[in-house]
């Protein structure tokens, strides 16, 4: 059971960072994967690479915050499998500013992609997840959803909301054989954090206050996501696992 053999999975934001690492992790464990991303060239290149390596991986170009793209993903899953075992809501963005500096458009964009899109996509794919009788949704939240990390209020708000979305859907959909869990990463080396990691004044405090004294790697998050997706975690639902090198365990 320490595998994902014959599982059908959808992973959003699957060409970079944690999403890409999760695609590779799932495939190595025996799953078939449909991954999404907005950049057509990146989707096509990654899909070709994976298929050349013998994996059952398929890319779908789209923005999961757009209704028509959610519809396109629904149609792809319906035609390809007609059933779904795993949904990983990983796609996310951030714009780092002081609270008073955000435009309404920027605020809505962050909330739309990080919070609204996972809810709408989970609801849309619900029939396929229910049909499997043993499904798992994993939402990628953030330490910013449980504490202030000085990375912008809308981002923290969206990730906190995603944690509560996780808990509510977990209790509502448990009777349908759908488990819903979240992970909350701390600083992880991804394209989303690459600019910050270059700033000595930003990264030094992170390393100083993280008990493990380092930045996480994307594959370390992917392995936790894989556990939630496996049948081995069959009695785990409604949980938010903070994967943070110990930062939330210390006040110093």
Image: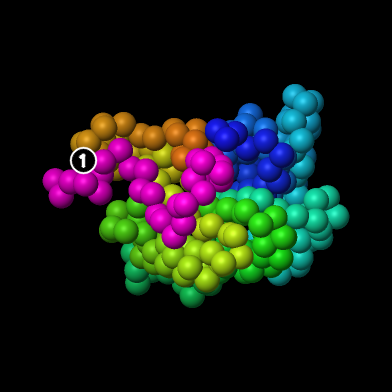
Is residue 251 within the magenta segment? Answer: yes
Whether residue 169 is visible here, answered yes or no, is yes
Spot occupied by residue 73 in the image (x, y as percentages of width and height): 75, 58
Depth check: 214 or 96 in front?
214
Q: Is residue 145 above or below residue 88?
A: below
> Which residue sits at x=35%, y=56%?
144
Spot occupied by residue 27 in the image (x, y as percentages of width and height): 66, 33
Tell me if 186 is positioned left or right of 108 in this view. left
Spot occupied by residue 147 in the image (x, y as percentages of width and height): 28, 58
Q: Which residues are the magenta region?
A: 225-252
Is residue 122 within the magenta segment? Answer: no
Identify the residue position indicated by label 1 in the image.
Answer: 209
> Which residue sits at x=71%, y=35%?
46
> Which residue sits at x=57%, y=39%?
22
The image quadrant where one finds the N terminus is: top right
> Which residue sits at x=58%, y=53%?
136
Tally of numbered discs: 1
Tell me if 97 is positioned left or right of 139 in this view. left
Say what secondary structure mark 1 lies in. helix
Q: Is residue 225 above or below residue 106?
A: above
Dot 1: within a 10 Å radius of its alpha carbon, few (fewer than 14), some, or many (20 or more) residues?
Answer: some
Depth check: 195 or 169 in front?
169
């Amino acid at each position: 059971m320490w595998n994902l053999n014959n599982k059908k999975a959808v992973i959003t934001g699957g060409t970079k960072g944690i999403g890409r690492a999760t695609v590779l992790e799932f495939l190595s464990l025996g799953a078939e994967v449909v991954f999404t991303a907005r950049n057509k060239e990146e989707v096509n290149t990654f899909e070709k690479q994976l298929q050349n390596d013998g994996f059952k991986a398929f890319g779908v170009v789209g923005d999961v915050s757009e209704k028509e793209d959610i519809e396109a993903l629904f149609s792809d899953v319906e035609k390809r499998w007609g059933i779904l075992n795993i949904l990983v809501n990983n796609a996310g963005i951030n714009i780092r500013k002081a609270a008073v500096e955000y435009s309404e458009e920027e605020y809505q964009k962050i909330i739309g992609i990080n919070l609204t899109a996972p809810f709408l996509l989970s609801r849309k794919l619900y029939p396929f997840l229910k049909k499997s009788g043993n499904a798992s949704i994993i939402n990628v939240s953030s330490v910013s959803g449980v504490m202030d990390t000085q990375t912008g209020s809308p981002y923290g708000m969206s990730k906190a909301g995603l944690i509560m979305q996780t808990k509510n859907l977990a209790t509502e959909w448990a009777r349908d054989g759908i488990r819903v869990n979240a992970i909350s990463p701390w600083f992880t080396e991804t394209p989303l954090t690459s600019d910050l990691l270059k700033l000595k004044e930003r990264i030094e405090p992170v390393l100083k206050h993280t008990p493990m004294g380092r930045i996480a790697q994307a594959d370390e998050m992917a392995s936790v996501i894989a556990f939630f997706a496996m049948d081995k975690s069959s009695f785990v639902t409604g949980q938010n696992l903070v994967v943070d090198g110990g930062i939330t365990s210390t006040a110093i």
